[in-house]
Amino acid sequence: MRLHVAQEADALYLRLDDSKIVESEEVSPGIVLDFNADNQVVGVEFLHLSRRTPSVETEKLVFETVPSVAAR
């Protein structure tokens, strides 16, 4: 899984795996899903990031793993 922040493009892209993208669909204004040949989502792009989250500090992204429901 990779996360790419393009400050010049004001976009954030989350790539879930390396399979070939065969189709993309804008599912909501500025939200684009990328699909592989098996119709699985393999990427998510958020456009106009600064308008969606004006206070986001992209140079300080925090990643968090939460315990599964079974472990609680």
Image (spheres, grey):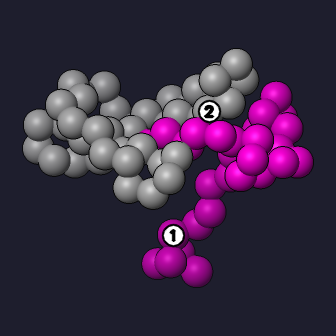
Magenta highlight on residue 53: yes
51 to the left or right of 17 = right
17 to the left or right of 56 = left
Residues 64 and 67: in front is 64
Residue identified by numbered label 2: 11
- Which residue is depicted at the point 75% across and 47% down? 51
Residues 65 and 11: in front is 11
Q: Report whether residue 31 is seen.
A: yes
Magenta highlight on residue 35: no
Per the rendering, the mark at residue 68 is 1
Q: Residues within 10 Å of mark 1 (few under 14, many from 20)?
A: few
- Quarter holding the C terminus? bottom right
7 to the left or right of 25 = right
- Which residue is depicted at the point 71% across and 52% down? 52
Chain-order first, disc 1 or disc 2 = 2
Q: Residue type at mark 2? A: Ala
**Quadrant of residue 48 within the rendered picture:** top right
Most extreme residue toward the top, as rendered? 8
Q: Position of residue 32 (x, y in %)?
A: 42, 44
| SS class, disc 2 | strand
| Distance CA(mark 1)–CA(mark 2) | 30 Å
Q: Position of residue 58 (x, y in %)?
A: 78, 34
53 up-or-down from 13: above or below: below
70 up-or-down from 3: above or below: below
15 up-or-down from 6: above or below: below
Q: Which residues are magenta?
A: 44-72
| SS class, disc 1 | loop
Q: Position of residue 34 (x, y in %)?
A: 32, 39
61 to the left or right of 55 = left
Q: Position of residue 26 (x, y in %)?
A: 38, 48
Q: Residue type at mark 1? A: Ser
Residues 53 and 71: in front is 53
